[in-house]
Amino acid sequence: MPSFAVCVLLSLLAFPALADDAKTSQAALPEWLAQARRMRAIEDHANDLKPARRDNPLRELNITDNEVREIQDVASRHAMNTMLNISPVVTGCPCEEGPLCTDQVFVVATLPDKTVSLQLSRIRNAWVVGAVQKWWFRYAELRKRGEAGGFKSFDAYESAKNQLLLEFPMCALNDSKEPRATTAQSRETAK
């Protein structure tokens, strides 16, 4: 089976209107492929960190009554008034949440027409919507806008999507050796 690059190159050469630009296109192809690979790698990493319920490692003290009230308050600001479930508190966060994130919970709530979820991070002793969850909110809005025809062209949508991918939270350089390491694991490694 021919590689992706070969398929693209053959497609470019198959159209006479593009044949004049073949030399220019061939020169730009490696750069375009590198950019496409980079965007795909970021998208794959974002999908690996998509907010979801985690059940380990559990925090020694699961959750306090005050934390439940705090979580309900944060969730209500996101139109989540009817709680179905608050996951156990897990210790550690993906390094993309930043070094001050210590714990996370996953909240599921019901709205009149659907069930929604929200991942909260404990940063500076407060439950907040973390950087990764905020990015996923923006990504959902982009997709919704794209599905509603809110872009002039597919290229305009792809350009907006690539820009958003470039804004995905990244680990600090010293944490990047192990992209899935939690901040708690990074602290243990540093000791």
Image (cartoon, rainbow, N blue to C red):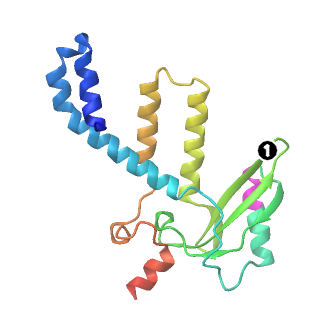
Q: Quadrant of the N terminus?
A: top left
Q: Answer yes or no: is residue 168 visible.
A: no
Which residue has dot 1 on it? 114
Question: Which residues are drawn in magenta?
Answer: 73-78
Residue that protrudes farthest toward the top in the picture = 17
SS of the residue under disc 1: loop
Is 142 in the magenta?
no
Q: Residues within 10 Å of mark 1 (few under 14, many from 20)?
A: few
Q: Residue at x 22, y 20 (%)?
A: 13
> In terms of depth relative to the viewer, which is nearer, 114 or 65?
114
Query: Residue 56 location, x and y as percent?
Result: 62, 76
Q: Answer yes or no: is residue 24 visible.
A: yes
Q: Is residue 11 left or right of residue 162?
A: left
The quarter of the displayed image where residue 165 is located: top left
Q: Is residue 66 above or below residue 135?
A: below
Q: Residue at x 85, y 43 (%)?
A: 112
Q: Residue at x 37, y 66 (%)?
A: 172
Q: Amino acid at mark 1?
A: Lys
Query: Residue 157 location, x and y as percent?
Result: 47, 30
Is 77 in the magenta?
yes
Q: Quadrant of the C terminus?
A: bottom left
Q: Is residue 30 left or right of residue 160?
A: left
Query: Residue 128 location, x and y as percent?
Result: 64, 63
Residue that protrudes farthest toward the front in the picture = 1
